[in-house]
Image (cartoon, rainbow, N blue to C red):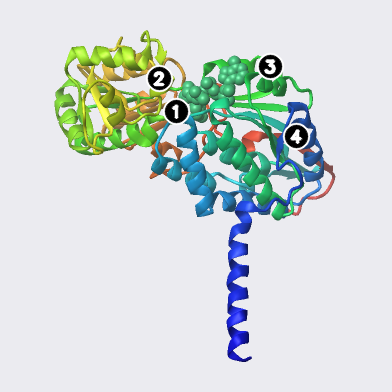
Amino acid sequence: MNLDEAVVESIVKKVLSQLEDQQPHESCCCGGECGVFKTMDEAVSAAVVAQQEYLGRSMHERAKYVQAIRDVVLDQENLEYISRKAVEETGMGGYAYKLVKNRLAAVKTPGIEDLTTDAMTGDDGLTLVEYSPFGVIGSITPTTNPTETIICNSIGMLAAGNAVVFSPHPRAKEVSLHLIRLINKALAVAGAPANLVVTVSEPSIANTNAMMNHPKIRMLVATGGPGIVKTVLSSGKKAIGAGAGNPPVVVDETADIEKAAKDIVDGCSFDNNLPCIAEKEIIAVDSVADYLIFNMKKNGAYEVKDQEIINKLVSLVTKEGKSPVTDYVGKSAKYILEQVGINVGDEVKVILVETTEDHPFVQVELMMPILPLVRVPDVDAAIDMAVRVEHGNRHTAMMHSRNVEKLTKMAKLIQTTIFVKNGPSYAGIGVGGEGYTTFTIAGPTGEGLTSAKSFARRRRCVLVGGMDVR
Ligand code: NAD
């Protein structure tokens, strides 16, 4: 090869490799819609056809498709785009946190390995009990974790052999549709049937209702507030409800106070308090409350003591003390403080306010980094109050204590799906705590931290006679 040929060859190689790099973002190999349909009926019908075809695919192929979803989300350009776009479109949360959450969903959501088989053998033969798909699932997703929920539901539902029709929150439409298109392209490249993951071009309450009422939707999964959970549970279909929380954190006199203070600030400020599991109110034993406050301030809490400013905050961020004002949900502590005339630096992550139990900041699930602290005389009073302010959601609670007896007492009385001892709330979804992740935590219907097996039916297959080798 002469010099000119070598130069041409190196240029051709470079251009080809650049084209290859662009492929995951630009090419559409799934035909027409890329999973986004005009009407709900078209979307559901396409998913029905896809799921029928999917039934014929092997477990090895399912694993490959699940991996394709993980890979397309973990592509750095895609990860950064969906994280930035989610913040821009919803006006909630922070880019750096969204990166962590989207990556977490892509990496730590269980795949087909979750579907274990039970076998029973004996004189009468062999019986298998296996996890089998429902068919087409309708999944309703929230504004607070729009992309994380789509990622983790897509992985779990496809791992279990289903197709899924998403009904995203209208305020997260653009980013949700973009992600669904990306997933479809990646699935097409991996050889999956087209339209396993679909939605409509105009998500709306009417379209969500059309999806819920569609006869071909076999199962509904709602991740959101009490209204939508109640609606799916009244649908007459098999439904999973992942509803609201109001997680209390109890700190008693035996706790490592310095660590508790840091854990609480870190957990409460994660994605500006959007996660349903994040610390929403502190209940502290009086003898350690001052030292806890002192250490929280060292770790990024800004304490507001002026009653006038506290009242201003209440009228700014709540609707008459009953529900949060959407414009402030998922906003940073710095931004919220600015609105009441207080300028602070980026190091401030949480607004700390000492209140009484009946205060709206304690009672309302705010989903913003305003953290009330209530003092109590002893740990038993703290546990009782935690149970009351959790409102029976049975969602998430935290406790910082070295007293095993009291930790056990709180776990038993509060009955939350997630109970984190001596750590930040996010340890409960696999960040710095053991175990897999999910963004659909089903307290009301009891599946708990959902995974592939939550989206599957238990079926028994019986072979009669002599398969026993004992
Ligand atoms: P939301 O209830 O307003 O919306 C959730 C979804 O339901 C959206 O897609 C919305 O369009 C739809 N929806 C709401 N009301 C509806 C109706 N009447 N008819 C049809 N569709 C309807 O919730 P949000 O503000 O997006 O999310 C925050 C809430 O979700 C908080 O309460 C939070 O605790 C909860 N959440 C729970 C979990 C969990 O895993 N348990 C996870 C994330 C969020």
Reading the chain from its start, which is encountered first: label 4 or label 3? 4
In the rendered image, which residue does mark 4 sit on?
A: 135
In the rendered image, which residue does mark 1 sit on?
A: 276
Q: Amino acid at mark 1?
A: Cys
Q: Which mark is residue 26?
A: none
Q: CA distance from mark 1 to mark 3?
A: 24 Å
Residue 184 found in image quarter: top right
Q: Is residue 356 visible?
A: no
Give the x, y percent position of residue 9. 62, 80
Q: Amino acid at mark 3?
A: Ser
Q: Is residue 105 visible?
A: yes
Label 1 CB sits under 8 Å from any ligand 1 atom:
yes
Reading the chain from its start, which is encountered first: label 1 or label 2? 1
Q: Are marks 2 and 4 in contact (CB under 8 Å)?
A: no
Q: Are marks 1 and 3 in contact (CB under 8 Å)?
A: no
Q: Are marks 1 and 2 in contact (CB under 8 Å)?
A: yes
Q: Is 30 situated above or below 389?
A: below
Q: CA distance from mark 2 to mark 4?
A: 35 Å
**Residue plotted at (49% across, 39% down):** 85
Kindly state the secondary structure of the residue where label 2 is placed: loop
Q: Amino acid at mark 4?
A: Gly
In the rendered image, which residue does mark 3 sit on?
A: 235
